[in-house]
Image: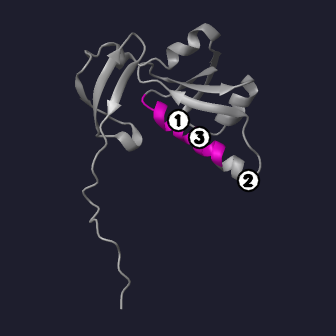
Amino acid sequence: MWQVRVKKNQERTAVIALLNKSLYYKQIGKPLSILSATCSDTIEGYIYVEAFKEIHVKQACDGLNFILNKMILVPTEEMPVVFQNDKAKNSELRDHQWVRIKNSGPYNGDIALVESVNDTKVWVRLIPRIDLTASGKKDRPMR
């Protein structure tokens, strides 16, 4: 994984542009040799690009004006730190507490019951929501 310097406050834009470029090159039959790209909310001015070689990262970043030419290979033992969620450490979750799921795709806004909490995981039981938009009537063919 490579740490790539970008203009400050352009981290998300850089990742999206890099992923869009990757998709475009794949469509035209010349895929880039990067595996993924991400940024961290806690580290400003850098994005992380997963690739086997530095030249692959340079080729992928070529032509993107908010990406600067400074790249550092992230040591293997420091890679998990990039993906740590510091917000979860400060939460005050307790067993048998009701919570609302946020930013989780199809479960966004659903209510859940916290089953157990440990240092790295929170186990929840989701309560299925009722679809109030469905009328319950079957569509009848028009005459």
Residue 75, can we see it? Answer: no
Q: Residues within 10 Å of mark 1 (few under 14, many from 20)?
A: many
Quarter location, residue 114: top left
Q: Are circles 3 and 2 on residues that touch, CB within 8 Å?
A: no
Identify which residue is drawn at 64% across, 46% down: 23
Circle 2: is it few (<14), some (14-19), or many (20+) Cα within 10 Å? few
Q: What numbered label is drawn on residue 81?
A: none
The dot on residue 28 is: 2
Relative to 40, residue 117 above or below: above
Residues under numbered marks 3 and 1 in contact, where contact means CB atoms less than 8 Å apart: no
Please say if 67 is above or below 83: below
Q: Nearer the viewer, residue 82 or 12?
A: 82
Residue at position x 31%, y 42% from top?
A: 128
Q: In this picture, is 30 found above or below 112?
A: below
Span of residues in magenta: 9-23
The residue singled out by tag 3 in the image is 19
Label 1 residue SS: helix
Residue 10 relative to residue 137: left or right: right
Mark earlier in primary sequence (3, 1):
1
SS under mark 2: loop
